[in-house]
Image (cartoon, rainbow, N blue to C red):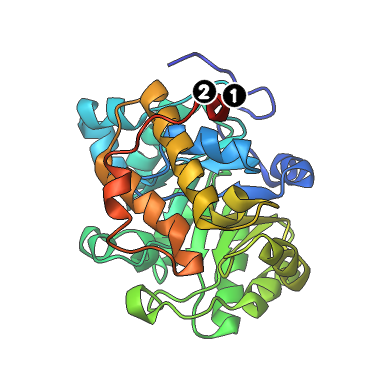
Amino acid sequence: LRHVRVHTCVGVFCDSEVMGVIFEKNKLVLAPMVDQSELAWRMLARKYGAQITFTPMMNINQFIRDPKYRKKVMEFSDEDRPLIVQFCGNSPELFAQSAKFVEDYCDGVNLNLGCPQGIARRGHYGSYLQDEWELISSMVKVPVSVKIRIFPDVDRTVAYAKMLEAAGAAFIAVHGRTREQNGQKTGLADWEQIRAVKSAVSIPIIANGNILYFEDIEKCLRATKADALMSAGNCFAISHTSFCSAFILSFAIRYYFVTLQMTKLCDKSYKALVISLYRPMHFFGTRYLPLTSRIVPPPVAFMR
């Protein structure tokens, strides 16, 4: 790890005014992906348009109590800035301790209040905290940011956002889907709810959801009036380039080599990311999976 002091914030705790300035020039945010947003992926995403990156969601219990886990997930670089480190959990004390560990290596800390997975239900974190406003308020009393999901009722969502603002949140990333919209029930994100949140609070809002193609970026920002937009990476990767199988394969090869240069390649994460890149064009299948395990070196000209 290289020692990097954040000059724009007091330690890691950026307030909403500072984050507002950051979002004025940086509109494209790479979403946190569990076990997939490692340093190599974040650095490659920046080459294709991502301006702010998030680490993978890290569990505060493991982060504080397991040195091996902490060493594994703390991947930072001077070139990967602005960077937001995301944690999940339900302990204000462990959350504060975790933030202290990373304050010299990032531009902000984010509390995940949106994960809808079964593991979040069992661990009692993510979106399964969304009804425990007193606990959440105690965890957001310093100006960290939060990532949330919406409620079915827009008034409840707006009240939730106002509570987070009053508690001290520096910004809110709003995924426009409910906790129940997950897996096969994903459905479409509700941009109208995101716009309602933006109209109701004064802190910066990041819109998340329904971004499959580059053209969706402007559509979402216009519809939600959000300060920035978050995507898992597809729209940044394709940029203005034609979205075709040849480009995605070349992108996957480039990611493979960037990963080898920076860290040990995680085969599971690599396959998952390549599949997610193919999904928007309905062009992934079992016949492409072997490519993620035995990609041949590209021509020298490609690496340039």
Q: Quadrant for the N terminus, please.
A: top left
Relative to 117, 191 lies left or right? right
Note whether residue 217 is visible: yes
> Which numbered marker is on residue 304?
1
Callout 2: 10 Å neighbours few (<14), some, many (20+)? Answer: few
Please tell me which residue is depicted at 55% across the width and 72% down the height of the picture.
176
Q: Secondary structure at mark 2?
A: helix
Residue 212, given in percent of the width and then of the height, sits at 57, 65
Quadrant of the rendered image containing residue 60:
top left
Above/below status of 124 relative to 4: below
Above/below status of 202 relative to 21: below
- The residue type indicated by label 2 comes to Val
Q: Quadrant for the C terminus, please.
A: top right
- The residue type indicated by label 1 comes to Arg
Relative to 18, 254 lies left or right? left
Residue identified by numbered label 2: 300
Seen from the viewer's position, the closer of residues 265 and 139 is 265
In front of the other: label 2 or label 1?
2
Q: Marks 2 and 1: CB-CB under 8 Å? A: yes
Distance Cα–Cα, label 2 vs label 1: 7 Å
Please tell me which residue is depicted at 69% across the width and 46% down the height of the picture.
16
Quadrant of the rendered image containing residue 202:
bottom right
Residue ranking furthest to the top: 3
Q: Secondary structure at mark 1?
A: loop
Relative to 25, 176 lies left or right? left
Quadrant of the rendered image containing residue 298:
top left
